[in-house]
Amino acid sequence: MEKKSFVSRFLTNIYVKNILLMIAAGLVLVIIILFFLNRYTKHDESVIVPAVKGLQVEDAEGILKAANLRYEVVDSIFTTGGVPGAITEQTPKEQSKVKEGRTIFLTIQAKGIQMVAIPELKDYSRRQAEAQLNSLGFNKIIIDEVPSAYAGIVISVSYKGQTLSPNQKIPKGSTLRMTVGAGGEVLEDSIPDADTNVDESFFQ
């Protein structure tokens, strides 16, 4: 009786009751959070990403929707010989396991020729100018050297016989012609002034 009475008094104690209620409420809250988190993340529910590379976006749309996936075209690139509008890259890759409703990011082949702005290259060194053009996708560069005051300095860049102005756009990968100074030309400032270099003692 004494033991039972002690337990009864312990459980009816206001502080103990409050602690037990807090523990119970905490457990219920954790269970609810885990339940909804499991539903939100769709735990153990995944789909296989289908292969859509090489397809047109319109055709890939139906395939991705059938797999409960969404898509977004994030970039378009121009590749010589590519099929305009065809998907060239997909992320995540095909056969990857993802959650339903995941967005598949697509890169497509540009439907038109990609135009690139040519930066100001006049007075740059040949090496710097070629590096910039290469980084923009221009790898076919014909070099013409002409006499100039300074060797290795770019005088102009032209496309199909037309000198390009700064930021003028031309088709990516086109053949360019770069005119570069070869040196050998004497600067006017370096030519001695005949009037100022005559030895005046000669006339005395």
Image (cartoon, rainbow, N blue to C red):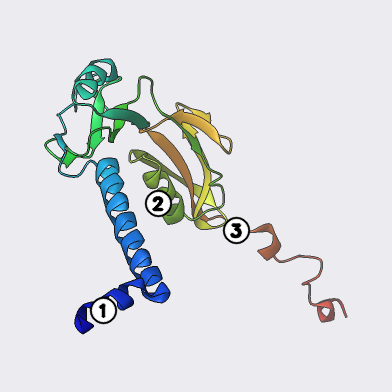
Residue at 32%, 77% in the rendered image: 9
Which residue is denoted by mark 3 in the rendering? 186
Residue 5's mark?
Answer: 1
Q: Where residue 92 sits in the image (x, y, percent)?
A: 22, 40
Against 202, is 68 above or below?
A: above
Distance Cα–Cα, label 3 vs label 1: 116 Å
Residue bearing mark 2: 131
Q: How many marks?
A: 3
Secondary structure beneath dot 1 equals: helix
Q: Quadrant of the C terminus?
A: bottom right
CB of mark 2 within 8 Å of CB of mark 1?
no
Residue at image coords 15%, 29%: 50
Q: Quick one: 6 or 148, which is closer to the camera?
A: 6
Q: Dot 1, how many residues are within 10 Å of its Cα: few (below 14), some (14-19), or many (20+)?
A: few
Q: Earlier in the sequence, mark 2 or mark 3?
A: 2
Residue at x-position 42% and y-position 55%: 127
* Cα gap from disc 2 to disc 3, whole angstroms: 29 Å
Compared across the picture, whether 195 is left or right of 138 comes to right
